[in-house]
Image (spheres, helix red, strand yellow):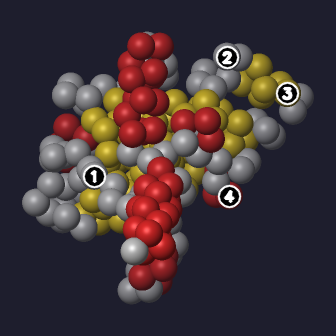
Amino acid sequence: MKKILGLILAGALLATGLFAQGEGTLNTVASVDLDRYKGKWFEIARYPNKFQKKCVGNTTATYTIESDGDIEVLNECLKKNGKTDRAKGEARIVDESTNAKLEVRFAPAFLSFLPFVWGDYWVIDLADDYSYAVVGDPKREYLWILSRTPELETSVYQGILRRVEEKGFDPGKLVETPQNVEVLKGQVIGE
């Protein structure tokens, strides 16, 4: 009997540990008003990822709702060579009851029928006034903190960090994104 209880306890501890490391349910915000969400967002911080490897700053995302209801995504960032990198994509709503779960694709449109070209884009934290948003995925591999302005107040940022940690993300993995920077002779100058 003690062995069975020990196994149950070990299993419970293992499950708790897995959740803390990013497994388990990820709750989104209750709803997203896409008309208020559209527009330009500045990236404040992100988990490192392969598709933003060349970005050194000035990273933004602009969402446009087209007349047919499609959502266009334009991601831009400054590269070390001083040029702006642009990636245009499309977002689609996965959960129409909340608009908080979307999928985004940057692959060509003719590949859109392939499920693996779509990435989860879940709004997991959002200011009441839409001044900031936090986007992640249920596997907790990706995380972005976005703001309508190039900077967030320290207290607001710290509050976001506490909430993402409660959701199973590791705030220590976040890399802050410099805004209002320039590149001069291969050197990043600015904030």
Q: Is residue 41 visible?
A: no
Mark 2 or mark 3: which is in front?
A: 2
- Which residue position holds label 1? 27
Residue at 31%, 48% in the rendered image: 123
Calculate the distance from the C-alpha at mark 2 to the C-alpha at mark 3. 12 Å
**Numbered circle sitting on residue 129:** none
Q: Are the two marked residues, 2 and 3, in contact with CB atoms closer than 8 angstroms?
A: no
Which sits earlier in the primary sequence, circle 2 or circle 1?
1
Q: Amino acid at mark 4?
A: Lys
Query: Residue 122 or 92: which is nearer the viewer?
Result: 122
Instruction: Please give the name of the residue rendered at 78% of the width and 26% of the height, measured from the top-left corner.
Output: 188
The residue at the point 28 percent across, 35 percent down is: 126
Quadrant of the image for the N terminus? bottom left
Specify which label sits upstream in the sequence, 4 or 3.
Answer: 4
Q: Which mark is residue 50?
A: 4
User: Dot 2 surroundings within 10 Å: few (below 14), some, or many (20 or more)?
Assistant: few
- In this rendering, position of residue 161 left or right of residue 65: right
Looking at the rendered structure, the secondary structure element under dot 1 is loop
In the picture, measured across the screen, residue 96 lies left or right of residue 110, that is left
- Which of the pair 137/4 is nearer the observer? 4
Residue type, mark 1 in image = Asn
Nearest to N terminus: mark 4 or mark 1: 1
The residue at the point 14 percent across, 63 percent down is 96
Which comes sooner in the sequence, label 4 or label 2?
4
Eyeballing the image, is 26 above or below 190? below
Instruction: Classify mark 2: helix, strand or loop.
Output: loop
Q: Which mark is residue 191?
A: 2
